[in-house]
Amino acid sequence: MIRVLLADDHQIVRAGLCRIVEESAEMQVVAEASDGEEALRLANETKPDVAVIDISMPGLDGLEVVSRLRSVTPRLPILVLTMHEEEQYVVRALQVGASGYITKRSAPEELVKAIMKVHAGKRYLSGTVAEALALRVARGMQGLSPVDSLSTREIQVLRSLALGKTNREIADIYHISVKTVDTYRLRLLKKLNLRNNAELSRFAIQNGLIEF
């Protein structure tokens, strides 16, 4: 029996994912988390065989959760589940240690298969995600977007600013100083040739870094 942890901030989505998982006789949901901090706590308490983590959650985002889970439980297979199909998200997720990446719209058909594959020690990418990565490779360096120049932490700070969080709130979420947050903010403005937080927010929306 494969023991699964599900983390998504939308209760209706979690309920749907739970139903999909438990329709399989080979797996069961042992914990459900509504945010990143709860996901980390429940992973430590329940010791799941596979963690399914949404990228866009309040507080700690999914990329940070994957990174922290990877540091404390390096052998835990982690499947990222998200609305985002953009290749920059896929690349970031794999860089911080995700074992697989599927979109929410493909979950009804692919979730069980993806969980079984990462549990077996393999990688899994949904079809649309694999296509996005293939296009990225085909484009090469000439096709890189401004987002590709940003580090994972810069993207996290950018998303947080775009969601209206203060420097202090961002510092508390990622366990860094307020001064460090402001350094990231200034670096983002310079890298992206923008002038203020409003333009950072517009950039994040236009590039699909936040969802509504």
Image (cartoon, rainbow, N blue to C red):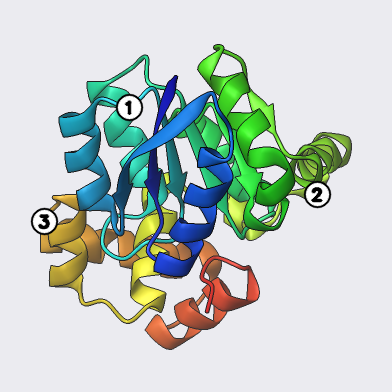
Q: Mark 1 points at which residue?
A: 48
Q: Looking at the picture, which amino acid does disc 2 mark? A: Gly
Residue 101 vertical placement versus 71 (above, below): below
- Dot 2 crowding, Cα within 10 Å, few <14, some 14–19, many 20+: few
Q: CA gap, disc 2 to disc 1?
A: 39 Å
Which quadrant would residue 154 be assigned to in this image? bottom left
Residue linked to disc 3? 177
Q: In the current view of this chain or complex, which residue is farthest to the right?
A: 138
Q: Residue at x 40, y 66 (%)?
A: 11
Q: Label 2's element?
A: helix
Point 21% across, 65% down: residue: 170
Please, is residue 73 above or below residue 29 in the view? Answer: above
Judged from the image, the secondary structure of the residue bearing numbered disc 3 is loop
Residue 109 at what x, y percent from top left?
A: 74, 44
Residue 150 visible in rendering: no
Residue to which mark 2 is pinned: 143
Q: What amino acid is found at the position of numbered circle 3 in the picture?
A: Ser
Would residue 44 be seen by someone viewing this image from the given angle? yes
Q: In this view, does 172 lie to the left or right of 78?
A: left
Amino acid type, mark 1? Pro
Q: Which residue is drawn at 69% across and 54% down?
A: 85
Drawn side of residue 136 relative to residue 83, left or right: right
Q: Which residue lies at the image location 47% right of the left edge and 49% below the top edge?
A: 18
Q: Which badge, 2 or 1, is on the more N-terminal residue?
A: 1
Q: Residues within 10 Å of mark 1 (few under 14, many from 20)?
A: many
Q: Is mark 1 on a helix, strand or loop?
A: loop
**C-beta proximity under 8 Å, tags 2 and 1:** no
Label 3 Cα neighbours within 10 Å, binned few <14 / some 14-19 / many ≥20: some
The N terminus sits in image quarter: top left
